Every structure is written in C-alpha cells, then in structure tokens.
Amino acid sequence: MARRLPVVGGNWKMHTTRTEARALLQALRADLDGLAGAQIVVCPPAPWLSDAADALAGSTLEVGAQDVHWEPNGAFTGAISAPMLAGVASWVIVGHSERRHLFGETAEETNAKLRAILAAGLRPILAVGERQEESDRTADILRRQLDEGFLGFDRLPADVVIAYEPVWAIGTGLAATPDDAQTRCALIRSMLAQRFGAAAADNCRIQYGGSVNPQNIGGYAKQPDIDGALVGGASLDAAAFTAICRAVAAA
C-alpha cells in the first residue's frame, strides 16, 4: 500500500470579517507551521485569499480557494478564474455539495472547473457525497459523481484529492461513524481503481468531511483508506483546527 501523506483542509465557507480572518491566519501559522505528518490547506473566503497568501508565505501551510469559474477570463461579473487564483492559492475545492445543491452547479460545470484548476497548475479537492434521501443508493451516487467529475480523463491526475462528504453530515453535527466513513472511502478507492488502475487509486488521497471535530477525528485518522479531513465549522476555531491537524499527523 502506498504511503500517503494525509491532507487536512479547513473550509471557512462564508465566515469571518477581514480582521477575524487575519487573526485566525496568524494563530494557525503560530500553532501549525512546521507540523510533520500532515499537509494543511487553509481555504478562506475569496476576499481574504491575498491576505492568506501573505500571512502564510514561507510557512508549511498552504492556501486554497473555495470555488472557481471554468473559463480563464471573460465577461463574467463576480467570477474568479483559475489563473487569477494561481497568484494567491495552490488548491481549489470543486464540486462541494453546497455548490451543487444550493447554487445548482451541474456535473458539466464541476468537470469543467476540475479541468480549469489542473490547467492552471493548481491542486483540486473534488468533493463527492450522497444526500440523506440517497443513502440507500450511496454506491450509485458516488460512482456517478466520480464518472461525471472525471469525464474525458484517461488517467487520474496525481494532484487530485477526493473529499468524501455525506451531505447530511455537513454542518449538522451529525457525523458518519469511522467504520462507515472508512467503508465509503474504500469504495471510492475501488471505483478509482476500476477506472484508472490500482496504482493510481492507491496513491490517491481521500479525505472524510462532515462535522469533523477534535473529539471524533481520531476515529477517522486511524482508518486505512481515510487520508485526512475536510473540516468546516471547526476550522474557524484555531485551537480546534490545530487539534484536528495534530491528531491526523500523529496517526
């Protein structure tokens, strides 16, 4: 089995003022810079990406964006392209359930965004996951989302991280059990192996996301097919996010 470096992403979503963001960035750098055993990606709201790039420059913490437009430029008021992000970030979240279900992002758009991210030399975190009413069809949902996301790809890009996030667990306080999360992440890995080969799938990092906190991260971190976490609410608290990152690194 490949030795995969776990990756912990902090998705701040639509939270923080500029003052709050700067304070949080400063605290995270102080607490986590140089931590061995985990890759840490901080994903603040778009207005604070430049602040994040400056605040974390020269540290081991990396900056990620929460979304991107698929076109490199054009008359798209309010949109942000991957080449623009390349100046301030190295990662981009794509296909998050909130983009899919709240903003109506289509499978075609997710695929186009994934291509744009890679074309700009950025690293994507591709989020997949089922809704509560789809729980009896989880395997079908995951396979469809992976097939749609990687439509037209003949190989699995080495830089892609997959985030398994059951939609019912995001922001609800209801988290999947470690065993269930492991089962789903192993299922995703098997689907990647069927599509791209065992070696590529074995090297791919797969996170769990959905109400991750310092109390439950240990159960996820020790699972063989879970390579870190995509953290929502807890990433807004420096002490909580630090505890999560340290637990992942220690595991």
Image (tube, rainbow, N blue to C red):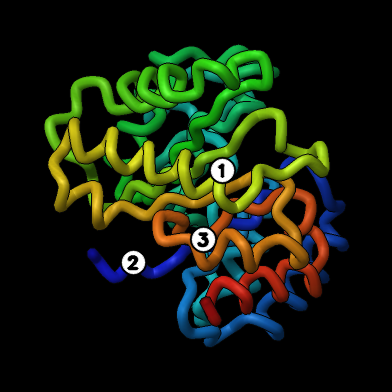
Task: Give the side of residue 74 with respect to residue 96, left or right.
Answer: left
Residue 116 spot, x, y in % from top left: 34, 33
Question: Toward the viewer: 60 or 228?
Answer: 228
Q: Disc 2 marks which residue?
A: 4
Residue 209 spot, x, y in % from top left: 61, 46
Numbered circles on residues, count = 3
Looking at the rendered structure, which numbered label has been put on residue 180? 1
- How many neighbours does mark 2 have within 10 angstroms: few (below 14), some (14-19), or many (20 or more)? some
Provide the secondary structure element on which disc 1 rests: helix
Provide the secondary structure element on which disc 2 rests: loop
Whether pointer 1 and pointer 3 mark residues with C-beta atoms closer than 8 Å, the reply is: no
- Which residue occupies 29% across, 70% down? 3
Q: Earlier in the sequence, mark 2 or mark 3?
A: 2
Q: Disc 3 marks which residue?
A: 228
Q: Nearer the viewer, mark 2 or mark 1?
A: 1
- The quarter of the picture where residue 103 lies is top right
Tell me the distance, in whole angstroms, between the alpha carbons under discs 2 and 1. 21 Å
Q: Is residue 59 shown to the viewer in this render? A: yes
- How many neighbours does mark 1 have within 10 angstroms: few (below 14), some (14-19), or many (20 or more)? few
Amino acid on which the number 3 mark rests in the picture:
Gly
- Above or below, comparing residue 206 to residue 147 in the picture: below
Tell me the distance, in whole angstroms, between the alpha carbons under discs 2 and 3. 10 Å
Question: Toward the viewer: 15 or 73?
Answer: 15
Residue 139 spot, x, y in % from top left: 43, 24
Whether pointer 2 and pointer 1 mark residues with C-beta atoms closer than 8 Å, the reply is: no
